[in-house]
Amino acid sequence: MVVRTSSTRDQIRVVSAKKGLKATVAEIYSRRELLVFMVKKELSTKYRNSTMGFAWSMLNPAFMLAVWYFVFSYVMRNGIPDFVVYLMGGLVAWNFFAVSLQSASSAVIENAGLVNKVSFPREILALAKVGQAMVFFVLQLIVLALTMLIIQFTPNFGQLYLLVPAMIDLIVFTSALCILASALNVFYRDIQHFLEVLLFGWFFGAPIVYSFTGNLVSGLSRYHVLIFYLSDPMAVIVMTFDRVLYGKANVINNGAIVHVLPNYSTDWFLAVLGVVFLGSMLLLIIAIKVFSKLEVNFAEEL
Amino acid sequence: MISVSIEGVSKRFRLPDQRFNSLKERVMHFGKVPYHEFWALKDIDLEIQEGTTTGLLGRNGSGKSTLLKCIAGILQPTNGQIVVKGRLASMLELGSGFHPDLSGRDNVYLNASLLGFTKKDIDVRFDSIVEFAELSEFIDSQVKHYSSGMYARLGFAVAVNVDPDILLVDEVLAVGDEAFQNKCMDRIKQFQAEGRTIILVTHGTDQVRQVCDYAAVLSKGILVYKGDSLESIRSYRDILVNDANSEEAAHVAATSETTDDTADKTREDSEHPPLDLGNAKSSSALERFVEVTSVAFRNKMGEKINSIPSGESLSVEFGYNSKNINEDLFSVFSIYTVRGETVYQNYLRDELYSILTLGEKGIIKFDIEQLPLLDGTFKVSLGLYDSQNRCVFLRDSLDSFSVTNPTKNTGFVNIIVKPAVEIDN
């Protein structure tokens, strides 16, 4: 028997090509439960039919970490003590960004069946990929925490609060690019391939496998490009993560002082993160606008 | 109250002449992809009242599915807007949101959530969904192991159990076995009884007759008729006849050039001129034109009547003008109830009875001996087809007659039933 609820009877929906930003955001927010279901779907289908299942989402970064660690600690020594923590501190943030963007670029295309048959805010398809990456992010943080426990490493608890603005920036920036890429890729399928190359290069634009000190900074300053380096939101976010999780600006290694992290103050970090936030919000607004404009022709292109 | 208001809606599709999806190809064409425009909908205005069932009729490619997708919010109109009041569930393709690797249970939640329902809504209805789909045993297996029937059942169950105010149905009632189809029809009738709004896309006129209160007829993206469902069927038939004629006209025009003033005159004079849809008109198409000028019901004394007692003889006479002189035509004579159920229809290719040869003017007469109908009002319709099966004339619900019932029996048909009892010793 069908139970009738009267609460929803007054809801009014307007279908039109001209949809405002506010209406779009309100619609996405009102369907947040769908986002949760979509993330669950992504997670439960990703490792379906593999013997190790969900364990892959932790094993994968652990293996990757082991390889990076081996390369930079034994083959190409970079002299950073406790390199495993330094590396992973930046890598968790980067992985969240890269995995989201890579998978979101094809999000609309791979759900063509849904896009053509069911009505819902399509931005959710891209956001579900961000949500999925968020789950992996948390799992990787757990791997990092376990690693810290094992090697008895103490993070910079005093500045833990810096992670809050860094996380917000990371989520907003990633979501903006994911929404943009998922829509553009419907019309230009090159985007997803282009992103692979771009992300590979971008990876080295942020201080993840090397430290942002010494020769690098003086080199960047000499050519007046330091500002460009720091206007990469990912560089700033990765530096913040390292600042909190690795914590030590100068480390004594075999009797020599090694500069690992820049000596910027927490105020500097807060200010830069604030600028990144404003820029990311602007990008997010542009992304939603572009998406709304392109969305009209999705059904025809797919 | 109006539950769906379609205001000046147009939809343009850009069909690229070739697919240019890569950046390289776009750059080579300086960002301009050669395409031609195609207006699938042109300035549609339609209001759908709450609690009514409306059919969208039209040939393939008439834009009816595009309109339904616009109402559902899947496509966005190029111009105009659609205001939808209330919760809407669409059945454009049953189970279209299902993921093969998820279990039936997970898919129910995902699908209902896609349709816009909260987890709490679904929790309340989950059992009735599973019960309706008759899948309680399999609800936790992956849907990729389901048969297509099970798939469709689950999809339908979700769509109808999530308590929509407005239900959009796109020819999905044609899937599944007969039992499932009946179940769907029952559910739709229950929906009607509960005062919900239903919009149904179909090209089956029987379905419109049976379920729809109103209908809108689309042809080439233009709304050509809106209103009473039986009238709309007539309008739809006009399009079919007209299109068939114009297709042939185009064919004939390629081989000969003819103009005929009288043919055009006939067309203007006729009681129901075929809709002008801007097609090429040729006299040869109009030469194949028959019109019915009058309908009369007569009893066995030859008196004109509107009602007749059950069991008496009835003649139905159609007065006609014809351009198809001395040509064998096949006739289809049908009797419908006012609700649109077919009571009788003869087989088109019945060589003995259905062939008629018409003169320029006269009467086509159908004699019915001992009318077996019980009380009710019945409509008659007539169709005429030439030997190549092309429709020359087709008109639904030309006129109606009523049957009075002198007995106390009820039903459609008087069947002579003799009760008897045998007692075992």
Image (cartoon, helix red, strand yellow):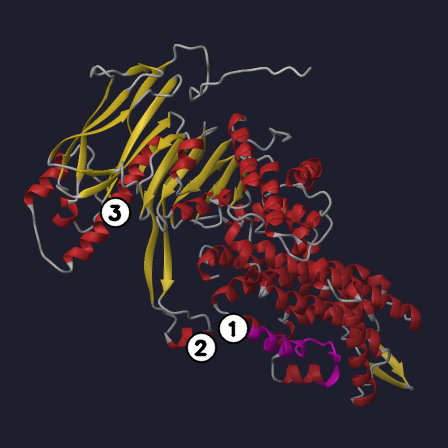
- Find the residue positioned furthest to the left: B261
* Front-lying residue, B238 or B90: B238
What residue does disc 2 label? B24
Magenta span includes B424: no
Q: Position of residue B237 (x, y in %)?
A: 29, 40
> Circle 1 — which element?
helix
Residue B127 in view, yes or no? yes
**Span of residues in magenta:** A193-215
Label 3 lies in what chain? B
Q: Position of residue B169 (x, y in %)?
A: 49, 41
> Circle 2 — which element?
helix
Residue B224 in view, yes or no? no
Q: Is residue B183 above or below residue A298?
A: above
Q: Would you identify the image quadrant in which residue B26 lies?
A: bottom left
Magenta span includes A213: yes
The answer to whether dots 1 and 3 both sit on one chain is no
What residue does disc 1 label? A190
Q: Residues within 10 Å of mark 2 (few under 14, many from 20)?
A: few
Identify the residue at image location x=59%, y=15%: B421
Q: Residues within 10 Å of mark 3 (few under 14, many from 20)?
A: some
Gap between marks 3 and 2, in whole Å?
51 Å
Q: Are marks 2 and 1 in contact (CB under 8 Å)?
A: yes
* Front-lying residue, B77 or B268: B268
**Circle 3: residue type:** Arg
Q: Is residue B141 left or right of residue A153?
A: left
